[in-house]
Structure formats: structure tokens, C-alpha cells
Image: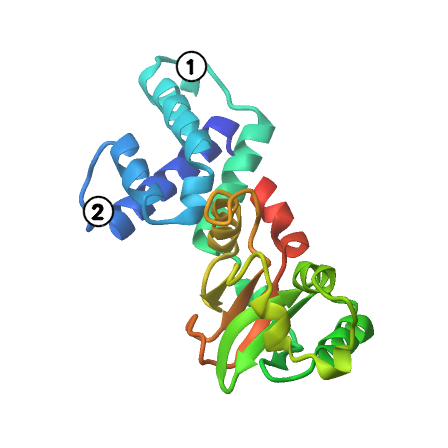
């Protein structure tokens, strides 16, 4: 049974070779250089960059210190090796946003508001994509409806078009459209960064999944904050 130091070094070597081949045209370079280059291009590596820097320092300790009786003086904890294995597995086999794919319930821009309300009630959802012919143009949500209601003296959802509700919206176009091949961590990063984009201090209402991330393509899924939250915090 290999010692933890050997396990750790085997994983480290695999990660280092992966970085060389994928991000540095197969050429050797110091690990910190490779890690920075990889993190600039890959959201998963970027997410674990600080941990990987620490693992790089640990590798130097293990390799450059003298051995005693053929064994390393220092031995990584089981938890360290397990964490490294987990990160390496995520790098090799990143989960794609296609895990969130499901039937998407939507409305058209000229539908009346009562249709959207019925969809929200029946399917217990608060975000409804809005189409203009074959193009995704908006995501209708409870805030849009509440803002519209506040400006009305009388209310008739069956006589009010969704376009009228959206015309009064305080926040518009607060969503993204992504490819089904995007990694979950890249989507989580988009969500996290949306909080600092306009409108600030407000996350995306939704990320809509299509085949290639184009607004005229068929929707294959939708991600809201509660779906992606655990990946933002890992």
C-alpha cells in the first residue's frame, strides 16, 4: 500500500503534466507558472488555485527534503490526499451544466400576464423565460410583477400583456444564456460575478441553457440561484 507521500506525489505529477500538455503546449515550466496560466483559462482550476499553490509548496517539501530509510520525513494527512484526489477528479471530469437540463416553461412577449402567473403557480417557479418569436429576450420574475402592480390603480392580468409588465421593470435583461457544454464551476463563477455587475448587488435571475449558448436556440434547461449556490460556495 503506497504511503500518503507517494500518493500525493503521483497525483501532483499527473496534475503538473496535465497543465503542461493542456496549457503550455507540452513544455516544461515551473508549477506556479503553469498553475497561473491554467487558472486564467479554466474556472475549476481558478476556484482551487490557492489550494493548488499550497500543494505545490508541499510537493517541494516532500521532494527536496532528505529521506530517512527511504521514506519521506514528512507525510501528508489523509485529508490532504483525499482533497487533492477530489480536485484532480474535478479537473479531469468537470460536471457540465447539462446536469440542470429539464423542461423549460416559457411565455411569449405578447402573451397576457395571467398565462405567466398560471405557469408560476402550477409548476411552483418564480422565473419564466420570455420569447419574442424564436428569440429569448427576458426572464420574467416576481419582482417584475410586483413593480408593475405598484404602478397600477386597477389590475387585470388577463388584459395585460407581458410586454407591458416588462416595460415598467426596474431591472431588465438580468440573465445569461450559456452552452450546455459549460462546466458547472464556470456557471457558478458567472453567477458569482453577476453580483458585482450592473445591476449591482443582485445576482442573475437565471442562466438559460441552450446547445451553444445562443438566444435563438431551443432552451434545454434553466439554472436559478438555489440550483447553483452549493457550487459557488464549495
Where's the C terminus, which quadrant? Answer: top right
* Label located before the other in sequence (2 or 1): 2
The answer to which quarter of the image holds residue 38 is top left
Residue furthest to the bottom: 133
User: Is residue 216 depicted above or below 28 in this figure?
Assistant: below
Report the front residue among 202 and 94. Answer: 202
Q: Position of residue 107 (x, y in %)?
A: 64, 80
Residue furthest to the right: 122
Mark identifier at residue 201: none
Report the front residue among 211 and 6. Answer: 211
The residue located at (46%, 75%) in the rendering is: 211
The answer to which quarter of the image holds residue 130 is bottom right
Mark identifier at residue 69: 1
Q: Position of residue 46 (x, y in %)?
A: 41, 41
Count residues near mark 2 (Cα–Cα under 10 Å), then give few for <14, some for 14-19, many for 20+: some
The residue located at (35%, 14%) in the rendering is: 65
User: Is residue 210 depicted above or below 47 in this figure?
Assistant: below
The residue located at (45%, 75%) in the rendering is: 215
- Check disc 1 and report its element: helix, strand or loop: loop
Q: Position of residue 75 (x, y in %)?
A: 50, 20
User: Is residue 219 depicted above or below 3 in this figure?
Assistant: below
* 109 lies left or right of 45: right
Q: Which residue is mark 2?
A: 24
Residue 1 visible in the displayed image: no
- Check disc 2 and report its element: helix, strand or loop: loop
* 87 lies left or right of 65: right
**Which numbered mark, 2 or 1, is in the foreground of this view?**
2
Gap in angstroms between the C-alphas marked 2 and 1: 37 Å
Amino acid at each position: 500500500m503506497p504511503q500518503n507521500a507517494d500518493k500525493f506525489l503521483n497525483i501532483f505529477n499527473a496534475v503538473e503534466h496535465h497543465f503542461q500538455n493542456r496549457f503550455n503546449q507540452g513544455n516544461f515550466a515551473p508549477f506556479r507558472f503553469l498553475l497561473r496560466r491554467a487558472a486564467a483559462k479554466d474556472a475549476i482550476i481558478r476556484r482551487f488555485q490557492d489550494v493548488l499553490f499550497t500543494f505545490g509548496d508541499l510537493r517541494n517539501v516532500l521532494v527536496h527534503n532528505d529521506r530517512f530509510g527511504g521514506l519521506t520525513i514528512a507525510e501528508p494527512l489523509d485529508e490532504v490526499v483525499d482533497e487533492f484526489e477530489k480536485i484532480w477528479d474535478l479537473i479531469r471530469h468537470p460536471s457540465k451544466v447539462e446536469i440542470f437540463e429539464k423542461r423549460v416553461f416559457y411565455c411569449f412577449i405578447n402573451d397576457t400576464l395571467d398565462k405567466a402567473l398560471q405557469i408560476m403557480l402550477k409548476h411552483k417557479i418564480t422565473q419564466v423565460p420570455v420569447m419574442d418569436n424564436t428569440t429569448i429576450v427576458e426572464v420574467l420574475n416576481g419582482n417584475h410583477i410586483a413593480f408593475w402592480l405598484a404602478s397600477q390603480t386597477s389590475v387585470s392580468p388577463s388584459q395585460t400583456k407581458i410586454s407591458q409588465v416588462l416595460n415598467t421593470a426596474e431591472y431588465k435583461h438580468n440573465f445569461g444564456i450559456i452552452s450546455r457544454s459549460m462546466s458547472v464551476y464556470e456557471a457558478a463563477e458567472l453567477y458569482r460575478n453577476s453580483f458585482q455587475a450592473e445591476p449591482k448587488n443582485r445576482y442573475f435571475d437565471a442562466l438559460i441553457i441552450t446547445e451553444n449558448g445562443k438566444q435563438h436556440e431551443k432552451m434545454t434547461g434553466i439554472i436559478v440561484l438555489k440550483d447553483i449556490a452549493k457550487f459557488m460556495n464549495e
